[in-house]
Structures are given as structure tokens and as C-alpha cells.
Amino acid sequence: MDKYLQPEYWSTLLLSVQEWMLEEVLVLSSALELFALVVALGAGWLAARPIKAWVSRYVERRTWRDHSLGRFVNAIGSLSKHIFSIVILISAYAAFRHFEEPARILKTAASLLTAWVLIRLVTSFVREPNIARFIAAVAWIIAALNIFSLLQPTLAFLDSVAIQLGEARISVLLLMKTVVLLALLLRLALGASVLLEKRIKDVKGLTPSIQVLLSKALKITLLVTAVVATLSSLGIHLTAFAFFGGAIGVGIGFGLQKVVSNLVSGLILLLDRSIKPGDVIEVGQTYGRIQSLGARYVSVVTRDNTEYIIPNEDLITNRVINWSYTDKTVRLRIGVGVSYDSDVHEVMRLIMEAAAKVDRVLEDPHPVCQLKDFGSSSIDMELRIWIKDPENGISNVSSNVRVAIWDSFKKHNIQIPFPQRDLHIRYESWDNPQD
């Protein structure tokens, strides 16, 4: 590390570069190689244009265009210009070697392009485009350093830039290895957790809450294992990070208080099984079906397909109506008022018959109609019906029942009264002494 800070080192390096430029670059053979390189790149670009368009049209007509095979074939079409250029460069290299010319530029260019083509073809199997591009860029930089014989010096330089934390020595190279290995293991852990979650959902003997709990526990276990395995494989002891314990404790006590509260609340909800995926709940003004249970929140989808993200803590501290906690069968109450001129027994019969005709109203328990009160302008009835699918909505079935009652009343001349008021205007006359 100290030699890079000395001026003599850099002056010697500049002299070496200058001497190399005069002997290897600024010569006729190098100019010819650069000309051949430009010709190869241009010819490859021109030759690949129709092939790239044909490959694109061919893949677009196939059902597997969005699969791994489709991405691989598309990558071949996109890289066809580089493939043609590689063929021309190899041919030019062979011609230069026939005349006993070194052709280092052509060899290096062909190696770089070949490495890029192979890396892009391999990374085309990665589904996420951004991750694929990142992996390809990192892999090609490593390959380029190796081609220029700069990989080992670069690694040595990165390893020399380090800090000492107690007994642990943390270098830039160690951090880069940690990031790469951790990303790979985390990716594998997430993929394994998805597969295990699918297998757990196929187990019919487990309740939805237990399935979610096992899935989350396995996911956390795999992620923690990936982190510990990464640190252990690189020779990093967890005791080296002991000094972070106080800062983490303060962060949890202040900034992460709500986050930790939601995590603990989510664990409690999974353990006591008070709510589970598929339940129909009502929290405040939000009514809908639980789509998923997360570590920090619960996703609730309403009847108008609006998805609410409710923190787990709100479900613990606030009153929650679970319409399907132990049984999905729910009773609804519908108020009906009729005129005092109506036959009460006939009205009750018509109301129950109209309710029974609605599809979602259960026959057992059967609809019940009761006389609740003698109002100021109407006889107040209450219809009680039962449904077993509250996740399909409550207001809609109530509306259907009211429409059926309305049609039945119209057919049998049953009047639904409305409040009336008699206004009496009284005139009084008197003599005004001032008139």
C-alpha cells in the first residue's frame, strides 16, 4: 500500500508505459491491426442486421418467447453482430500470424468480445433484466482484467486497502467478496423459501395461519443461515460486530420501535390464529377479505378491488370484526316499514317469501321476520337472513333482498309509508291602536 503513495513508483510506471507505446503501439503493424478491428466491427454490424430482425420476428411468433429459451434465442440475435465480428477477427488474427506478426490487438479484441458473448448468453437465463445486466457487467470486468493480466494486481491492491477493527481485518476485497457471496446465498435462500412455501400450501392438514407461520419461519431461518454462512466462509467472526449491538439497541428503541411492534404483532396474529388468509374482516371503515399476511402488514382487498395495507399493530390494538372467524355463516338484519292499513301476517309472509327467492340467502337457518315496533307513521318490521359467503359482499345481498320485497309489495298492493306532517295555519286579527 505504501508504494502507491510514493512519487518514484508512478514516475517509473509512466516511463514504462511511454516505452511500451513507442515499441508496441505506434508502429505500422498496430495501425494495420486497428484498421482490421474497425473493419471487423463494421462488417459484423452490417451482416447481423437482417439476422437480428429475423430472429426477433421468429421468437415473437412462438409461445415460449417469454421463457428462458426465448430470452436465450433473443440474446443470440442481439449478439449476432459480435459473433460475426469475432469470426472476422479470428480470421484476421490467423492472417497476421501467417506473416509472423504478433497481432496482440486482434487477439485481445477477439478475447474480450468472446468473453462478452459467452457471459451474455449465460446471463440470458436470469429472469430479471437488471440483475442479468449487473452480473454480466461484473463478470466481463473480471474477464477483461484477466485478459490484460491485471486481475492479480487488482486483487492485491483491493486487499491492501483495509481497516483494522479489533482482531478483524476488513479490506475492500473482503467486502466485495462478502457482497457477491451474500447476494448469491440470499438469492438461493429466497428461491428455496418459495419452493418450500408452495409445498407447505399443498399440505391439507395445516390451517392457513399455520401455513403462513411455517413459511415465514422457514424464510427467516434460511435468510439468517445465508448471512451466517457468508460471514463464516470468509473468516469473519460475529464477535467482530459486537460493537454494533449498542447502536442497534438504540435504533430499535427509537427509530425502529414501530417496525419491531408490527413484527411482533404479526407473530402474535399468526400464533393465536385470530385472522388468517381468506377471512372477511372489518377494521374501522375498511371491509374486505384478507389477501395475505406479511411480517409487517396485512393486505385486505375490498369489494371494489381496493387493496389496503393495514399494519399488524392496528389489528392488535383496535377492534376488529372477523365475519368468518369460527364460522362463515352470518346473519343480516334488514328493516322494513309498512302502512297501518296492511295485514301484518300477510306482510310477514311476503317478506320471508321474497327473501327466500334470493340466491345467497340460506334456507337453513331460514329467514325470519319480526314485528319490532309501532312507529309514528309505519309498522316497523325486521327481516333476519343468513348467508355463508360474506367475502362476496353484504350490502349487495341486502340490496337484492330489498328489491325482492319491493317487487312483492308492488304485486300485492302493500304500501310503504313515509313520514307525513299536517301543517295548520292559524290567522288571528286584532286592532292595532296605532292604526
Image (tube, rainbow, N blue to C red):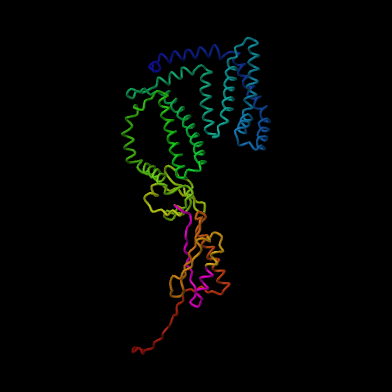
x, y (%) of residue 104? 58, 15
Q: Nearer the viewer, residue 125 or 282?
A: 282
Q: Is residue 174 above or below residue 187?
A: above
Q: Is residue 364 above or below residue 379?
A: above
Q: Is residue 234 left or right of residue 342?
A: left
x, y (%) of residue 286? 45, 54
x, y (%) of residue 128? 54, 35
Judge whether residue 350 is colored magenta: yes
Residue 127 location, quadrant = top right
Q: Is residue 334 above or below residue 119?
A: below
Judge whether residue 86 is colored magenta: no
Residue 259 location, quadrant = top left
At x 42%, y 23%, the residue is 234
Q: Residue furthest top?
A: 100
The mark total stands at: 0
Q: Is the N terminus in the top left, top right, bottom left or bottom right quadrant?
A: top left
Q: Nearer the viewer, residue 225 or 422?
A: 225
At x 52%, y 68%, the residue is 351
x, y (%) of residue 413? 56, 75
At x 47%, y 17%, the residue is 152
Q: Is residue 303 left or right of residue 274?
A: right
Q: Is residue 370 above or below residue 153?
A: below
Residue 358 location, quadrant = bottom right
Q: Nearer the viewer, residue 318 or 25?
A: 318
Q: Is residue 47 left or right of residue 345?
A: right
* Magenta-tinted stretch: 326-351
Q: Nearer the viewer, residue 372 or 265?
A: 372
Q: Is the C terminus in the top left, top right, bottom left or bottom right quadrant?
A: bottom left
